[in-house]
Image (tube, rainbow, N blue to C red):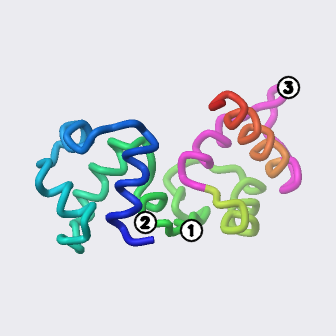
Amino acid sequence: MELGQKIRQLREEKDLSLNGLAEKAGISKAYLSQLENDVSKQPSAEILLKIASALGITIADLLDQPVRVYAEDFEDEDIPDVLSEFIDKRGEALDIQKEDVRMLMGIRHRGNQPKTIEHWEHILNTIRIVIKANER
């Protein structure tokens, strides 16, 4: 699907008018129309971020491109070794995003963090199920 079609589809799913999304994203209605109609084909990363943020999604979602997250992306943060291993081994398959990692870093069960990759995966999958159930 072309970028313009994707933007239009997502905008309509969110029940936003062209003008509504343009205002929310802080871009002109005319430019958004050009993007949706594939007249303008190469928006800047800044424009993509504005549109994605206004739609409540990531740029990766907007572009239908997975973003690979690595444990080394968090080297300034105190990430547990097993969580780091989980991200590196299962991150791509599970489409783990930076927000997921930051959320997982705060998880404690009886005062401790999970000690195996399998436990981290179980926790992530459980959280995703709960989130989907609440979106309905």
Q: Which mark is residue 68?
A: 1
Identify the disc placed on residue 110. Answer: 3
State the residue in front, 107 or 75.
107
To which residue does mark 2 refer?
63
Element under disc 2: helix
Q: Secondary structure at mark 3?
A: loop
Closer to the camera: disc 1 or disc 3? 1
Is 28 colored magenta in this rendering?
no
Do callouts 3 and 2 mark residues in contact (Cβ within 8 Å)?
no
- Residues at marks 3 and 2, CA–CA distance in whole angstroms: 40 Å
Residue at 18%, 38% in the rendered image: 23
Picture residue at 11% right of the left edge, 48% below the top: 28
First-in-chain label (1 vs 3) = 1
Q: Residue type at mark 3: give it.
A: Arg
Q: CA distance from mark 1 to mark 3?
A: 31 Å
Any magenta on residue 99?
yes
Left or right of 67 in this view: 92: right
Bounds of the magenta span?
97-119
Q: Residues within 10 Å of mark 3 (few under 14, many from 20)?
A: few
Q: Left or right? Give the position of 88 relative to 72.
A: right
Q: What's the residue at 32%, 64% (across, down)?
A: 4
User: Which quarter of the image is occupied by the N terminus?
Assistant: bottom left
Foreground mark, 3 or 2, reads: 2
Q: Crowding near pointer 2: few (<14 within 10 Å), some, many (20+)?
A: some
